[in-house]
Image: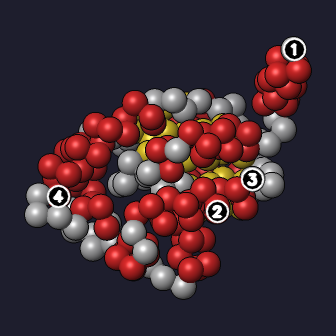
């Protein structure tokens, strides 16, 4: 009974806009940071990039964290940073592509606001990231095969978001406008 009441209160809080942050998720190269920055600017809101905050906190790049501490440590840092951001209000956030791997992260993101997954095909994602040296999960012999494998594992998780937006063959500005329209948010004049 108490759980039902708490869930009803959380549902009501979501409806009236409590914790009304916009949280972007999606695979690497989907456009989370770029689109998130545009949405934040149009709304006049603060923008937080989880990966950038982790780099600042640790004094290491994401590549260095993966090389020196491993992926499990990095995933712990993602959860820790997300927890630190939980008190933010009226902000826009970009998460790392793997943040969806932990159910606890989903619970935090849902409490914080609306989760938007930016989606793209494997071919488009690969074209966007193939020449970038700062993608530790693609530092393998066959990076496109690894991208396809990881995307296959994560795609069902991205689909748990409140809003799904396909970014294939679309400009970041167009994607941002779609997000604003679909979430019913009007930019400040």
Q: Nearer the viewer, mark 2 or mark 1?
A: 1
Q: Is residue 171 visible?
A: no
Residue at mark 3 to residue at mark 1: CA–CA distance: 26 Å
Earlier-in-chain disc, 4 versus 3:
3
How crowded is the residue under tag 4: few (<14 C-alpha within 10 Å), some, or many (20+)?
some
Q: How is the image coloured?
A: secondary structure
Residue situated furthest bottom in the rendering: 59
**Residue 92 on image: x %, y %:** 66, 53
Earlier-in-chain disc, 3 versus 1:
1
Q: What element carries label 1?
A: loop
Q: Is residue 183 above or below residue 56?
A: above
Residue to which mark 3 is pinned: 86
Q: In this view, does 27 lie above or below 142?
A: above
Residue at mark 4 to residue at mark 1: CA–CA distance: 50 Å
Report whether 14 appears left or right of 138: right
Viewer-proximal residue, 35 or 82? 82
**Residue 27 on image: x %, y %:** 38, 48
Residue to which mark 2 is pinned: 81
């Amino acid at each position: 009974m108490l759980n039902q009441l708490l869930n009803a209160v959380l549902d009501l809080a979501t409806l009236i806009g409590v914790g009304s942050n916009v949280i972007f998720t999606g695979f690497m190269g989907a456009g989370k940071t770029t689109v998130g920055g545009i949405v934040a600017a149009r709304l006049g809101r603060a923008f937080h990039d989880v990966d950038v905050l982790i780099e600042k906190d640790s004094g290491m790049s994401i590549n260095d964290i993966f090389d020196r501490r491993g992926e499990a440590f990095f995933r712990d840092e993602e959860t820790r940073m997300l927890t630190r951001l939980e008190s933010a209000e009226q902000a826009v956030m970009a998460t790392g592509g793997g943040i969806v791997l932990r159910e606890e992260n989903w619970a935090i993101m849902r409490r914080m606001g609306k989760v938007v997954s930016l989606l793209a095909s494997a071919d488009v994602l690969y074209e966007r990231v193939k020449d970038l040296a700062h993608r530790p999960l693609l530092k393998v012999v066959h990076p496109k095969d690894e991208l396809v494998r990881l995307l296959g594992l994560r795609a069902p998780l991205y689909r748990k978001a409140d809003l799904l937006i396909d970014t294939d063959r679309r400009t970041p500005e167009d994607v941002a406008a779609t997000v604003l329209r679909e979430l019913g948010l009007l930019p400040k004049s």
